[in-house]
Image (tube, grey):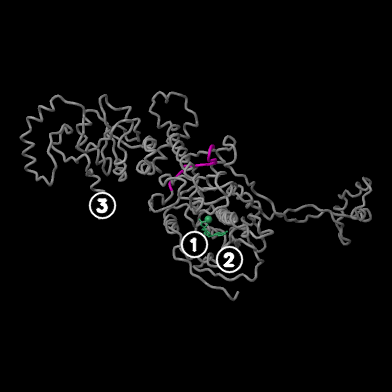
Amino acid sequence: RGNAQQFEFQAEVSRLMDIIIHSLYSNKDIFLRELISNASDALDKIRFLSLTDKEVLGEGDNTKLEIQIKLDKEKRILSIRDRGIGMTKEDLIKNLGTIAKSGTSAFVEKMQTSGDLNLIGQFGVGFYSVYLVADNVEVISKHNDDKQHVWESKADGSFVVSEDTYNEPLGRGTEIRLHIREEAGEYLEESKLKELVKRYSEFINFPIYIWSTKEVDVEVAADEDDSSEEESSESSSSEEETEEDTEKSEQEDAEKKPKTKKVKETTNEWELLNDVKAIWLRNPKEVTEEEYAKFYQTLAKDFSEDKPLSWSHFTAEGDVEFKAVLFVPPKAPHDLYESYYNANKSNLKLYVRRVFISDEFDDLLPKYLNFLKGLVDSDTLPLNVSREMLQQHSSLKTIKKKLIRKALDMIRKLAEEDPDESNDKDKKDIEKSSDDDEKRGQYTRFWNEFGKSVKLGIIEDATNRNRLAKLLRFESTKSDGKLTSLDQYISRMKSGQKDIFYLTGTSKEQLENSPFLERLKKKGYEVIFFTDPVDEYLMQYLMDYEDKKFQNVSKEGLKLGKDSKDKELKESYKELTKWWKGALASENVDDVKLSNRLADTPCVVVTSKFGWSANMEKIMQSQTL
Ligand code: ADP
Ligand code: MG
């Protein structure tokens, strides 16, 4: 291997491998689904390229888009091979070691606290899980643009890449050879691998085969020096003699030499492990919850124990036809709101007529819905155009609009089905179903993970603002430590109350003691607490709800119903307010007014209707520092 070149792993990658190698994590199974997932991605890529250029597939076996698993018990090698896009020498060096992905350090950090290795795929470093079971790994790869190369590493901080002049040519694609560690022998058992493929990779859209070894009984002529008489006596050849006059020479041989014996012989054949059905093409009524949950895992590369919070599987008809499955994940990914405005990553996979096109279409869903995972498959879109052309296609607008609708419906239902969300006290008396228990608290879980996305939606999506406002949850002076909604607020409004009152600040505790609340509380008005920095922006966009205006109670304009004494009081304190205005320089205050919003506190500083609230001033200051 004269042309071998050695490379150091990028530092974070090296750390990650160290952690994996020394991990006491018991579920080592995960490596297989990560490899199969990579093989499937590579197959998706070549299939996509072949849409516009048939040549890329080559001919013969190279056109078979499949995954093959093989075992060599003696050499302790497990290999997984695909006929995907493959990797050039440069790809091998970059993708498997020298360029760390953004998720690498996040994952390393997580692992050092109490991380779950199971989540490795979500961080974009799933490949390295091979070192859970192997102490040496070879990646043999052939890309159309390069010669066949081998990448090899014993996870000792470095890897070697060399041109492959010694293995059998792959044609195209990648073969990963795992030299299985002493203590991981179970992964050399065919039955174990079959079980894992069934468990984790059922929804991979390419056929997965295993080179299956079967022992079969065959009847052979007994050797002359064979002393085992019992075996031959079991032979049925003597009975068959009379059955028919066969021309078969073996039969004649058997007749001549009635001494035969049964022996075990091993045969090998490719056995298909999955049926390649697209779950989204099936009738939703016939898909079980379990199947959706498993499909979600494969789609989102999220193999945590938690099931998705919700899903929506539907067919859109009309000018633009498509099928889609949308999922609300159980948890927000680690980087959901990081670089929110620059990141262009929708989590929807786009298929055209069952062919995977891209998971980087930025315009299938608005940014605020990027937390959803899912898939869209359209028959209306053209197949044989470039991704760029497709991105411009007019149907995408219609698809996007329908997806948003369905997504918001799905979230609304999460709330509607949650017994904890119900306002109606009588409902508690209705017999509880076990379904109820499962759904109890699901909207709070949703809100805690993705509430911020709803708020960003209100800011960004004027068309759906009202629908999104319905999904809003918050605490208030009357919510009793629980979350409440605008509809619930309105149902509790006092007669004669016109506006929805709210107050912004940094914490509920701070707001609860605010002098702005004194009078309102005394009079029994409910005030919403907004304590998230994004809430200040939110309230610049959310002007009204169900014909009711929002009123920040720390701002000018608070009306608490008419008081006949107001005019009288204003008159009698005229001189005093005038004096105060003169005493406080006019660059510091705009006006001094008699107020009916206070109870015990003698005076407060109020912001003007169109100015920033004190809280907003604070946020802006912290941002410019
Ligand atoms: P991810 O799959 O999330 O990108 P991985 O750590 O699993 O992260 O894989 C790293 C990269 O290595 C992939 O993005 C891909 O470029 C490359 N790769 C891994 N396996 C294969 C394969 N079987 N065929 C082609 N490329 C592969
Ligand atoms: Mg992967």
Cα distance between the residues tagged 2 and 3: 52 Å
Indicate the amino acid at tag 1: Met
Q: Tell us which disc is closer to us: 2 or 3.
A: 2
> What residue is shown with label 1?
17
Q: Secondary structure at mark 3?
A: helix
Q: Nearer the viewer, mark 1 or mark 2?
A: 2
Instruction: Determine which residue is flagged by label 3.
Output: 622
Q: Are marks 1 and 2 in contact (CB under 8 Å)?
A: no
How far across and down, in percent of the image, does residue 601 sit?
15, 36
Residue located beneath label 2 in the image: 145
Q: Quadrant of residue 498?
A: top left
Q: Is residue 171 magenta?
A: no
Residue 319 magenta-drawn?
yes
Res 476 visible: yes
Distance Cα–Cα, label 3 vs label 1: 39 Å
Magenta stretch in the rendered image: 317-332
Task: State which tag comes first along the sequence, 2 or 3.
Answer: 2
Q: Residue 402: image x %, image y %?
A: 48, 39
Mark 2 CB within 8 Å of ligand 1: no
- Residue that appears at 26% across and 52% down: 622
